[in-house]
Each structure stands twice: as C-alpha cells, then as structure tokens.
Amino acid sequence: MPSQVDALSRKLSAFMQLKPEDAAALEKLQGPRTLVSAGKEIVYEGQHRHAAYVLREGWAYSYKRLHDGARQIIDVQIPGDFLGVRSLLLRTSDQSFVALTDIEVSRINTERLWEIFHGTPRLALALLWAASRDGAMVVEHLVSIGRRDALTRTAHFLLELGVRMKLIGRGTADSYSCPLSQSILADALGLTAIHLNRVLRQLREANLLVFREGVVTFLDREALAEITGFDFTYLDQNMPASK
Amino acid sequence: MPSQVDALSRKLSAFMQLKPEDAAALEKLQGPRTLVSAGKEIVYEGQHRHAAYVLREGWAYSYKRLHDGARQIIDVQIPGDFLGVRSLLLRTSDQSFVALTDIEVSRINTERLWEIFHGTPRLALALLWAASRDGAMVVEHLVSIGRRDALTRTAHFLLELGVRMKLIGRGTADSYSCPLSQSILADALGLTAIHLNRVLRQLREANLLVFREGVVTFLDREALAEITGFDFTYLDQNMPASK
DNA sequence: CGCGCTCTTGACTAGGGTCAAGTGCAGTGG
DNA sequence: CCACTGCACTTGACCCTAGTCAAGAGCGCG
C-alpha cells in the first residue's frame, strides 16, 4: 500500500500548522508499522494492559457486544485515526477493535505521550483536539441512532465518512471507496442488515446515493444535506481556539 | 444545599488516593461557586468561546437538537461531573448544557489545567481518567440505544445512574432521588415520553423497579442485572493502571 | 463441488410512534 | 375563593417503521 502523505499529520494540520519539531515528535510517538490482517482483533473488550495505536493504512472498527450476542459498532477508523486512546487509562478496554481490511498500525509509545505534553504543547493540543473530535463524532452517532430514522441515519453516516475520507486526502467530494459490508454498516447504524439493504435501495432509487461494490457515490449532495441536516463544516472547522 | 463531602474529589478518590497537594490543585482549578436556576442554559450548542464547569450541586443534562426539533439527551450530570470539558478545544461547543434543577457550578480555570499537567501529574491522570470514564458512558449509552429494546435500555440507564449516585455518596444501594421528568428521560433514551411511561409501568408491574415522585427504587437488582447484562463494576473498578 | 459469506427480495409480525382524551396538580390572576 | 393555564403523567386505539423468517442468487475458496 502506498503511504501517500501521512494521514495523521494531514488530519491534524487541518486544525493547526504543524511545525517541524511537532512532526518529529509525532513520528517518535509512533512505533514501527505492524501489519494486521483483515478480521484480526487488535484490542478486545475487557483486555488488560491494552495499548493504543495509530491506524496508518486500511480500515478498522470498534464495537461492543451485548450479552445476547448482538453487536453495536461504535465507530469506524480510517487512516490517521487512533485506536483505543480513550480507554488507555481504564483498567480494561471498554471496547474491541478489529481490522476491517488488512491494515498497518503503529503502537503508541505512552512515555512519549507525556513528553509531548511537556516538550511540544502545541502538538499535545492538536492531539487532544483530535480526541475531542472523535468524541464529538461518537456523540453525533448517538444522536443519530436515538433520533433519526433509518434512511436519514444511513445517509448521515455515509456523508460523515465521506468528509473524513476527504480530510485525509482519499476520495473526492462525491465518491469514496468504502470496504464496509452491509452487515457491518447495519451494526454501526443499529439496524438489521436486511433493513439496511432496503434503505440502500431507497437511497439508490431516489437518486441520492449509491453504495455498490465498495464504493459510495453521492448523486445529490444538496438533497442529502437537506434531508439529514448535515453540517459539512462540523468536522473541519472546529479548530482550536486562537491561543 | 449542604455541600456534603465534595463530590468531585469523592469520585476521583474512587480511582486514586488524592494527596493533599492534589486536593489543593483541584480546589484551585475551580472558580467560585455560581448559582444557576433550573432550566437555564449554561452552554449552548454552537457557542463560541464557551467555558467548562464542574457541577457542584444539583443535576444538569447535555443534549443536541436536530433540525426537525427533536432532542437527544447525551448524558445527565450529577454533582462532581464536568460540563463541557470535552468540547473545550472545539471552536464551538457541539452540545448544550442545561440546569435540570437549581444548581451550583464552578467555572474551570483553563490556565490552571495546564499547571496541573506540569505540577501534579497524578491529578492530571485522575482528571483524564474521569474524562475517559465519561466517554465510556457515552459509548455505553450509544450501544444501549442501538441494540437494546426499550425496557432493557430504561432499566440499564437507571441502574447506571444509581451506581453513579452511590459513588458520590448520594442514595443507597437500591434507591436514589432522581429529578428527571419522564419526557427528559425519554429524550435521553431515544423513546417518546408516552412509550417510556408504558415501559415504566411494565417495570413497576414486574416488580423490578419503581420510579415515582422523583425517586427510583430498585425492587430486584438481581433480576435487573440479569435482564440488562449490567456490570456493577464497570464504573468503579476501572482504576488507572498500577504505574 | 460444496461451504460460507454477502447481497437481495418477499411476506409477515411486533415494538414503539402517533393521535387523542383525560387526570391531577401548582401557579396566577380575578 | 374560584377560574384558567400549563405541565407532568396516564391510558387507549391505531398505525407504521423496522425486525423476523424464509428463500434464493452470486461468488470466492478449500
């Protein structure tokens, strides 16, 4: 896989100019690249002494399982995203992370994390910023599941993914490749795979968007934004305060 | 209102012994207590230059509103909880915070926050820990709305609140006072107030729990834990790693 | 060649939403 | 003192969105 421009620094620089020393510290934070093949768990729920990672290449997702076997996907991660940072301080991980495709990850060096807080506070701010953005996405997801119907929810989710992909330089304004299967997408949206299939058909037949053969194509972004109330600025304009 | 034992230090000490200098730094972090009356907004979605607060006394909740007017409550806050810390670094707040009862809040002094990271890293760790726990609760809430039916979801939510109340020394093992109205509870659970009412009746008639006149009483915690798969340890055993 | 997985569609069901009506307060103003 | 309003809660009747069950097609793989 081509490493392209590093996705993480690309994402962070959407919020703040990274100085050379920031970039250097960021690079030192990440351990060597490790390959994990599709379907393998990187961190599992309840794991003790779990680490956190940066996803360098490929897709992953985090989920929790209920005692009746049902699965809810919390979030999907694309290159440049963190895996498990939020649960780093919990004694056990509160969620599982799985490779959706073959991926490359770098383990985060926790000691370096503290060094960043002392040595390059600008970068620390950027990292906290990214963590806040991830939190905001989980919140938005919660709202979506709680109060949007299946069609709106699906459209919103795919729009958001599109914006995220564009931010890291993959995909265009109205198309991106998306390796999610329908059953995974359904578990992310709190739907059954069967109903999701019907929803995708509706979206297709209404000429709003097409999701076929691993590619999402928006046919009418205006209408989609109108239906979902999607705010195209919410992921890339939340820059840190001026200080 | 009696200040009782400070709820925040009580919550944090469930995870880590607070040394006197930690307690001092914690106190300096918080500005003077301010009264806000029930129904008033403390932070609103989209607010610029928003601050973060510690809730000293009373209840609050955070929510987002959709463009069709629907409201989804993200989380409710009880004494010792933070308001708006996660969105501190976002240019605009991604959610609103409202006083549910008359409350006392203290504004967080952001400069002191950085001092804590340098001067009392133990305390910084405890604060990050609390933020992680809050994130874990949002995730659990997401899972609940996505994959649990109305009855289980309601029971789980009320159980969790009970544990949180007990952790800060309010309420007993099987009862606590809870100022949530049915319509607010419904908006938290992604239900309509009408259906929530039916669910509460079911819970009452099944002798599982009673929520009446602002008091939640568990009649059968065993059965409730069984039905919901509730893990009574998840909020208070996630201590930071031993280091 | 058969197994498993993803996707698709149809028929039926049920959980939860919608609409409507009514009760019981706590204010508030005449 | 009583009307009037508003809000929280309650209940019933009905409906619709999304889940369940069932079946089949297409495809990669051992």
Image (tube, coloured by chain):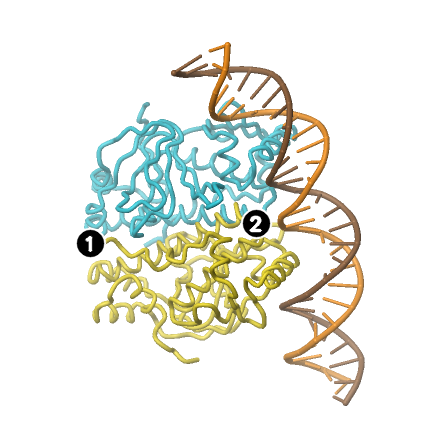
Chain colours: A cyan, B yellow, C orange, D brown
Determine if residue B149 is in view.
yes
In the image, taking residue D22 as reference, residue B189 lies left or right, namely left
Q: Residue at x 28, y 46 (%)?
A: A48
In this orientation, which residue lies closer to the viewer: B41 or B210? B210
Q: Looking at the rendering, which quadrant does residue B120 occupy?
A: bottom left
Q: Are marks 2 and 1 on the same chain?
A: yes
Give the residue type that dot 1 points to.
Lys
> Which subunit holds the residue at mark 2?
B
Residue A94, percent from left and from top: 37, 48
In this orientation, which residue lies closer to the viewer: B151 or B131? B151
Give the residue type that dot 2 points to.
Asp
Category of crowding for the residue at label 2, using alpha-carbon neighbours closer than 10 angstroms: few (below 14), some (14–19), many (at least 20)? few
Can you tell which mark lies on residue B41? none
Can you tell which mark lies on residue B243? 1
> Which subunit holds the residue at mark 1?
B
- The quarter of the picture where the C terminus of chain B appears is bottom left
Can you tell which mark lies on residue B149? 2
Residue D19, percent from left and from top: 59, 40
Category of crowding for the residue at label 1, using alpha-carbon neighbours closer than 10 angstroms: few (below 14), some (14–19), many (at least 20)? few
Looking at the image, is A126 positioned above or below residue B126?
A: above
Judged from the image, the secondary structure of the residue bearing numbered disc 2 is loop
Residue D24, percent from left and from top: 63, 19
Q: Earlier in the sequence, mark 2 or mark 1?
A: 2
In this orientation, which residue lies closer to the viewer: C7 or A140? C7
In this orientation, which residue lies closer to the viewer: D21 or A36? D21
In the image, taking residue C8 as reference, residue B30 lies left or right, namely left
Q: Residue at x 54, y 43 (%)?
A: A230
